[in-house]
Image (cartoon, rainbow, N blue to C red):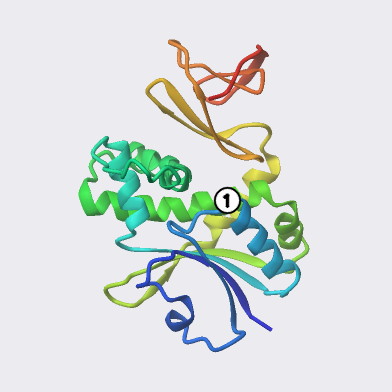
Amino acid sequence: YAYATVLGCSDSRVPVELIFDAGIMDIFVIRVPGNVFQTDEIAGAEYGVGHVHTPVLMVLGHTDCGAVTATVAMTDKHGHAHKLERNIPALLKPIIPAVAGARKNRPDLKGKALIEYASELNVLREIRQLFHNSAAIRAAVKAGKVKVTGAIYDIASGKVVLMEQKKIDQIFSEVEKEGFAFDIEVLGSTAIYTTRGGYNMCQVDREGHFFVDSRIVSPKGNIYQTKPTKPI
């Protein structure tokens, strides 16, 4: 049986089996541009942990990621998309919070440095996304059946750098305690928020409040009132 489930990027420079010197049946691999957890990828992770019984689940990001680079350009309003490429923005949407977080945490970073930092944050955010949207994975973690971890593959050196496990453990603890909304990023008149249902977008009013499923949410994420609304 495979000893690890790995979510990696579709980039041809990140061949998971070769990176870990693995053979046939050694790794259960899930690949998608930007190594993001959406419904299909979460289902793959649940299968790898619950049916292949892998004791490790890794989210593997990498340097010089094209998906993160495209998201940085898109949020800079410098991105260029073909008029028929209607599905690519939806693929990049989950990466926007990582880019926004990188800019917020490190406003001094530009260009490649910003992209690499955003790639690291994206790994951590996808792990949070997985925990929030998979009761099966959370149960497996609590039962000690799987260890979830994150890493960045350096395509220049060929080295895999593991992230601090305490960061992943902290994310898990936060998800267990969290309620309705978390990870709020306000971009102009639009807010990107995450719930157990995934990434969503909604309108923001002049005071910075936004409306989620008939709840009014403050800029800090506090839910304090109900109000009918239509998410965008």
> Percent x, y for residue 43?
67, 58
Inspect the image, locate mark 1, and give the three-letter code of the amino acid beneath it.
Gln
Residue 5 position (above or below residue 138): below
Q: Is residue 170 left or right of residue 138?
A: left
Provide residue 88's location: percent of width, then percent of height: 42, 47
User: Compared to 114, does 83 lie above or below?
Assistant: above
From the image, tell me which residue sits under label 1: 38
Rendered residue at 47%/18% (across/down): 204
Q: Residue furthest front?
A: 84
- Tell me if 154 is positioned left or right of 151 in this view: left
Please report the residue visible at 71 percent of the width from the left and 61 percent of the height from the top. Answer: 141
Residue 152 rendering spot, x and y as whole percentages: 41, 65
Tell me which residue sits at (44%, 51%) in the image.
122
Q: Quadrant of the N terminus?
A: bottom right
Q: Crowding near pointer 1: few (<14 within 10 Å), some, many (20+)?
A: some
Q: Nearer the viewer, residue 82 or 77?
A: 82
Residue 221, by quadrant, is top right
| Nearer to the camera, 201 or 118 | 201
Percent coordinates x, y for residue 140 in the rendering: 74, 62
